[in-house]
Image: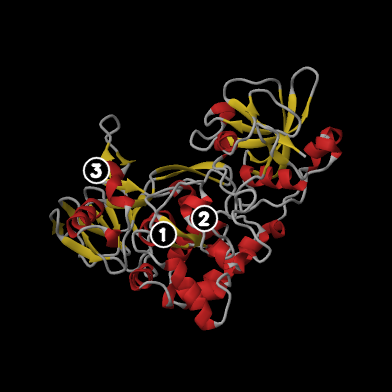
């Protein structure tokens, strides 16, 4: 199936399109899983799952049973509970019988009870085990949720207002914001190669320079990616497979007498200036009301034309933006983290060059996450990654999850090692020191002591969005370091 995702759907042959359709339509998407969730620091057991379902979608009985009714919930004697219905009390139904329709696009809540052999009582079990094919699209957000830097946050609100006025659902908007947040920090002025040091082809006029605008893949990436004919501007690239989205954007901006990097211009272009395939697909996409995570994948594949690169990051950001949308874009502390007073006082004299954490540019990483904290600290102190040959390398917005930072630094030509140094970046391998197995963690080394122990500063340790500090007594194979310089 991954082979089918290498190209946008409209570029596949009719036979491949049919195969992709069969593979993706034969399953149920589950947006909420059965099991425990921590709410207000207390583990709470949820007995249900939620399946994606559009408004007015027909519901059929998953098994034979007798109906009992509880307000608008249909309950079969076999234990399945399904939202909405049009059946009568004690009515017999068979598996496959139509029993109702969904009222909206919020999903289908399903519970299932079976008789416990030991107690002879009904107990809840996971309904997902009893369907032929269920895909889990709920993304678990392990980091601080719903907090972003100021400029990105304000641009996201402007995009929300525009897309909402054009009929997009909150879930679809969150999916788009999630992709753009990962791709460009929702910055309309981003262009392919501008994150390199120095920005490729940089000139005094830069964004308006025709030579800089038209640079291709081999020029930007040292001979690689010949399929990129003209560099990506925001989300728009000219490629060898026929895409002219870079050119179309510039032509549209010229007709409108605006700059291509104007956010409003780019939003108008999405709906009125892009290729017919993209504009039509987008208008249909606006109607979706499934989970933001699953919609983020659709947007990544069919609109971005990406086979799945950075999928988990996009899904995570989409879920975070959905949280922001649902609570009305109310961001605590104005996007500025505070140092935890008690822990700050105990280590005040041990900071790197005696500076106190605060300020700094998180370069697009979501506010409150461990990655945001390290990027902001590095930039606050004016540090650069130390190259193997003494060169200085800038932190980029695509360093990855916490456990990836040292590896990414090495790929950029940075000097890495297995021992802490003052000002170095520390990556925890996933699963080490209690870190999430999928993401790991990243922190900043403030001081190294004579006995080999060292002080780190970080954000989101145990869910705390403030700067906190820990003293580690030594190193093992799960820790790695990337070194910095002034």
Q: CA distance from mark 1 to mark 2?
A: 10 Å
Quick check: 133 above or below 67? above
Q: Nearer the viewer, mark 3 or mark 1?
A: 1
Dot 3 and dot 1 residues touching (CB under 8 Å) = no
Q: Earlier in the sequence, mark 3 or mark 1?
A: 3
Quadrant housing the C terminus: top right
Q: Nearer the viewer, residue 158 or 89?
A: 158
The residue labelled by disc 2 is: 183
Q: CA distance from mark 3 to mark 1?
A: 35 Å
Residue 419 percent location from the top left of the image: 68, 23
Does residue 330 show up? no
Element on which disc 2 rests: helix
Label 2 crowding class (10 Å Cα cut-off): few <14, some 14-19, many 20+?
many
The residue labelled by disc 1 is: 304
Residue 141 percent location from the top left of the image: 51, 46
Name the quadrant containing residue 68.
bottom left
Q: CA distance from mark 2 to mark 3?
A: 38 Å
The residue labelled by disc 3 is: 130
Give the image's coloring scheme: secondary structure
Q: Nearer the viewer, residue 194 or 68?
A: 194
Residue at (52%, 79%) from the top-left corner? 254
Name the quadrant containing residue 117.
top left
Residue at (80%, 43%) from the top-left corner? 341
Quick check: 216 above or below 309? below
Dot 1 and dot 2 residues touching (CB under 8 Å) = yes
Residue 131 percent location from the top left of the image: 24, 46
Element on which disc 1 rests: loop
């Amino acid at each position: 199936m991954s082979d089918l995702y290498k190209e946008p759907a409209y570029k596949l042959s009719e036979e491949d399109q049919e195969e992709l359709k069969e593979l993706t339509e034969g399953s149920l998407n589950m947006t909420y899983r059965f099991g425990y969730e921590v709410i207000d620091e207390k583990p709470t057991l949820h007995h249900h799952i939620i399946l994606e379902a559009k408004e007015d979608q027909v519901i059929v009985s998953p098994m034979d049973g007798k109906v009992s009714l509880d307000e608008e919930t249909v309950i079969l004697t076999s234990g399945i509970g399904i939202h909405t219905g049009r059946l009568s009390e004690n009515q017999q139904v068979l598996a496959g019988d139509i029993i109702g329709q969904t009222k909206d696009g919020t999903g289908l809540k399903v519970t299932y009870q079976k008789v416990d052999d030991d107690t002879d009582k009904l107990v809840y079990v996971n309904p997902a085990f009893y369907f032929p094919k269920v895909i889990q699209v709920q993304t678990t957000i392990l980091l601080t949720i719903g907090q972003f830097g100021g400029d990105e946050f304000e641009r996201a609100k402007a995009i929300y207002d525009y897309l909402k006025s054009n009929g997009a659902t909150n879930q679809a908007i969150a999916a788009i914001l999630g992709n753009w947040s990962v791709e460009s920090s929702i910055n309309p002025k981003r262009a392919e190669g501008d994150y390199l040091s120095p920005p490729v082809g940089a000139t005094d006029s830069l964004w308006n320079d025709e030579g800089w605008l038209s640079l291709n893949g081999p020029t930007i990436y040292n001979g690689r990616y010949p399929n990129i004919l003209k560099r990506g501007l925001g989300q728009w690239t000219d490629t060898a497979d026929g895409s002219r989205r870079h050119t179309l954007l510039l032509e549209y901006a010229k007709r409108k007498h605006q700059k291509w990097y104007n956010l409003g211009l780019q939003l108008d272009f999405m709906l009125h200036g892009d290729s017919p395939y993209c504009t039509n697909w987008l208008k249909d996409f606006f109607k979706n009301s499934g989970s933001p995570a699953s919609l983020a994948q659709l947007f990544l594949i069919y609109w971005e034309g990406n086979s799945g690169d950075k999928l988990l990051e996009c899904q995570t950001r989409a879920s975070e933006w959905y949280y922001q949308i649902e609570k009305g874009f109310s961001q605590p502390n104005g996007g500025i983290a505070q140092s935890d007073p008690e822990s700050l006082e105990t280590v005040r004299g041990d900071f790197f060059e005696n500076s106190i954490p605060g300020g700094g540019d998180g370069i697009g990483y979501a506010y409150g996450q461990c990655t945001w904290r390290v990027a902001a600290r590095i930039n606050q102190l004016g540090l650069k990654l130390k190259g193997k040959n003494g060169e200085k390398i800038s932190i980029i917005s695509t360093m990855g999850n916490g456990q990836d930072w040292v590896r990414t630094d090495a790929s950029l030509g940075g000097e890495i090692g297995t021992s802490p140094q003052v000002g170095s970046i520390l990556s925890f391998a996933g699963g080490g020191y209690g870190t999430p197995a999928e993401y790991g963690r990243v922190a900043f080394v403030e001081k190294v002591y004579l006995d080999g122990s060292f002080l780190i500063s970080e954000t989101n340790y145990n869910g705390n969005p403030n700067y906190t500090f820990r003293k580690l007594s030594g190193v093992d194979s799960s820790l790695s370091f990337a070194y910095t310089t002034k």
